[in-house]
Image (cartoon, rainbow, N blue to C red):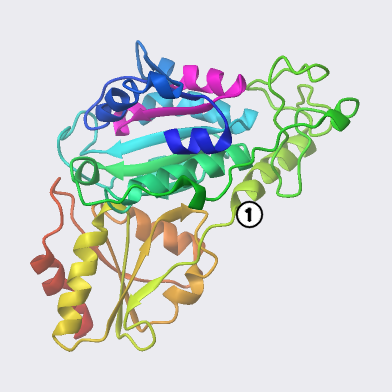
């Protein structure tokens, strides 16, 4: 998050409220005032998200961190970020649920909440970090997408990733892609309106105080051309579609297939913090002479453009996740005539590779 703020030339603001297992992010960022980081431990989850949205309106890279129960409380302010089209990074370090559930245990049960847990048509990009070392890149790209496409972004990890560690080489920031928010330009002063869009569908960002760009944003639907409050049916339909299209068009890397990519009898599919267990299972099965491939999703919304091609290439596909089938359901929504096998556990514990291997061998031999 600090690296992305530096790359974008912005202040970093974190509005947060302590919650297991996400509090360490607040603790760590609070140590870095010397780097221009502003942290506020707010009175509740709602204030944490709302204050971050205010910081975004004022021109900062704004973030808020929590776990599943906090996402419930933040959802109204997240929705406000959707309709105002302001950049915001929402970190969800997943834990066991529902309610207080298993606060110190790990699950992947918040996926559909991240995708749909708001009123109205409220599309948001969703990124899922796959390991402790992947968190840097995942957070950086979440910030880049939020700032360049003027949208809230959900960055998902889980307690297994949050409490894990691995060797990691400090990267060279010069090697990372530029972050270029779509700011208004002086030439636009006489013609700009709040929902004027660039070539990728992002509205232009006018920082309050910029002479000639006085404007108001808010939760009521706005006219696409003037930015004034509008209840026109056709305008609302248009704005809803524009907000969705903006997310759909965000470029993400293609899905990579590991293992026997060309001739596998079984494709293993996962997302987020189960990467290591699923990769190890594939390696064991291949060592035993089985033709197996593995595709792990980091970008959940929008999905990589080659998703359908990959998933339909193999005779058998199994989607393994620590919930009752949320990602498999999402893939079925997005890929026509896709009917995968599923492996689901909701134990609050990491997958056991031996259990995965036994289950996948049953599918392999069918």
- Residue depicted at x 18% and y 55%: 345
User: Is residue 148 left or right of 104 when viewed as pictured?
Assistant: right
Instruction: Give the percent coordinates (x, y) of residue 346.
Output: 18, 50
Image quarter of residue 72: top left
Quarter that holds the N terminus: top left
- Residue depicted at x 86% and y 25%: 189
- Residue depicted at x 34% and y 53%: 326
Image quarter of residue 317: bottom left
Classed neighbour count for the residue bearing mark 1: other residues with Cα under 10 Å, few (<14), some (14–19), many (≥20):
few
Magenta segment includes 299: no
Q: Which residues are magenta?
A: 49-70
- Residue depicted at x 60% and y 52%: 250
User: In this orientation, does residue 88 appear?
Assistant: yes
Q: Residue furthest right?
A: 190
Instruction: Give the percent coordinates (x, y) of residue 199.
Output: 76, 49
User: In this orientation, does residue 110 appear?
Assistant: no
Magenta segment includes 60: yes
Kindly identify which residue carries mark 1. 249
């Amino acid at each position: 998050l600090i690296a992305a703020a530096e790359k974008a030339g912005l202040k970093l603001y974190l509005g947060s409220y302590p919650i297991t297992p996400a509090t360490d992010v607040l603790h760590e960022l609070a140590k870095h005032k010397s780097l221009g980081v502003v942290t506020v431990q707010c009175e509740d989850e709602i204030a944490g998200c709302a204050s971050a949205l205010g910081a975004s309106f004022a021109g900062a890279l704004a973030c808020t961190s929590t776990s599943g129960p906090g996402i419930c409380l933040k959802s109204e302010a997240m929705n406000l970020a959707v309709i105002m089209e302001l950049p915001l990074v929402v970190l969800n370090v997943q834990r066991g649920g529902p309610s207080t559930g298993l606060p110190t245990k790990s699950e992947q049960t918040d996926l559909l909440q991240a995708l749909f847990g708001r009123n109205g048509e409220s599309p948001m990009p969703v990124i899922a970090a796959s390991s402790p070392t992947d968190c840097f890149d995942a957070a950086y790209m979440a910030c880049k997408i939020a700032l360049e496409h003027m949208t809230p972004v959900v960055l998902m990890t889980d307690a297994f990733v949050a409490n894990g560690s691995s060797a990691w080489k400090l990267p060279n920031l010069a090697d990372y892609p530029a972050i270029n928010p779509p700011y208004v330009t002086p030439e636009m002063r006489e013609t700009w309106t709040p929902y004027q869009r660039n070539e990728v569908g992002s509205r232009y960002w006018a920082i309050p105080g910029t002479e000639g760009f006085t404007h108001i944003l808010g939760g009521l639907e706005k006219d696409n051309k003037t930015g004034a409050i509008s209840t026109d049916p056709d305008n609302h339909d248009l704005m809803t579609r524009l907000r969705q299209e903006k997310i759909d068009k965000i470029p993400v890397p293609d899905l990579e297939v590991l293992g026997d990519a060309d001739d596998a009898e079984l494709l293993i599919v996962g997302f987020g913090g189960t990467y290591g267990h699923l990769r190890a299972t594939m390696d064991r099965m291949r060592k035993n002479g089985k033709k197996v491939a593995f595709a792990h999703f980091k970008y959940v919304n929008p999905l990589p453009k080659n998703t359908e091609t990959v998933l339909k290439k193999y005779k058998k596909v199994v989607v393994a996740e620590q919930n009752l089938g949320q990602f498999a359901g999402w893939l079925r929504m997005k890929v026509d005539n896709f009917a995968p096998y599923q492996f689901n556990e909701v134990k609050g514990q990491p997958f056991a590779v031996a259990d995965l291997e036994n289950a996948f061998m049953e599918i392999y031999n069918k």
